[in-house]
Amino acid sequence: MRCCFKSIVFFLLFSWGVQAQEESDLRELTKVPDSVPQVIDSLYREDQFYLGLTFNFIDQKPASISQSGFSGGFQLGFIRDFPLNKKRNVALGIGLGWAIDTFGHNLFIGQEENGESIFRSLDRDWNYDTNRFTSQLVELPIEFRWRSSTAKTYKFWRIYGGFRLGYLYHFKSNFDQPNNQVVQNNVEELERLRLGATINFGFNTFNFHLYYGLNTLFKDAYIDSQKVGIVPVRVGLLFYIL
């Protein structure tokens, strides 16, 4: 009798233990997580859009030409990022952008009655309020990119070097003095196809930007037998946005 009682008790305890384990396993399977797990994108890309603000300068100019007033620029565009290695911290960037630049200076650009362009240096004897030209370009940025980013890091160092191919589709030279204004849009000597070298580097949001033109803005233009030339230079900040 005592053996039978012990067997019944053992069977009940064993059955209760099995049932408790099954209920515990079921709770684990149906448990709702407290938070959504973070998904790591192993195929991430960086820096798709850019926006820049620059101060503009002119280089390789005749000795009689100097800058005056404020010269600035604005640029924006989209760049497609193509990672080149497994870590995805080395990449090639190719995109499309737009830029507007202004240059204040003492170079007068006009036109003779026969359509021939006039290039003249405005010395101190000239009384004028404004003398500047403005250009608008469509650009094709090509960048070789290195960065310290990872799939989990959103703040990182970057060094991007490359080129900008561009087409100058709009040009306006504006000379303004009391009771006289000269606006010139069509300048035969203007080199509309543009090529420049660029380097962008920085950390996180703020990045230093440098653009140096590799061809002169004017061809076959002279002041007193000296070539006008002029190479545009941009120095400023560039902001990259995913």
Image (cartoon, helix red, strand yellow):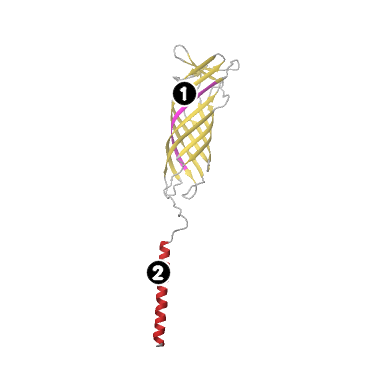
Could one spot residue 227 in this view of the protein? no
Say which quadrant the N terminus sits in. bottom left
- Discs 1, 2 touching: Cβ within 8 Å: no
Q: Quadrant of residue 82?
A: top left
* Relative height, residue 129 to residue 29 (above, below): above
Q: Percent position (x, y) of residue 238? A: 51, 37
Name the residue located 50 percent from the left edge and 31 percent from the top edge.
74
Q: Of discs 1 and 2, which sits in the foreground?
A: 2
Q: 54 or 178, which lies in front?
A: 178
Q: Percent position (x, y) of residue 19? A: 40, 72
* Relative height, residue 187 to residue 26 (above, below): above
* Relative height, residue 226 to residue 209 (above, below): above
Secondary structure predominantly adopted by residues drawn in magenta: strand
Q: How far apart are marks 1 and 2 (CA)?
A: 80 Å
* The label number, if any, that marks residue 236 in the structure image: none
Question: What span is in magenta?
Answer: 131-145
Q: Which amino acid does label 1 sit on?
A: Phe
Q: 26 or 67, which lies in front?
A: 26
Name the residue located 48 percent from the left edge and 32 percent from the top edge.
75
* The label number, if any, that marks residue 171 in the structure image: 1
Q: Name the residue under label 2.
A: 22
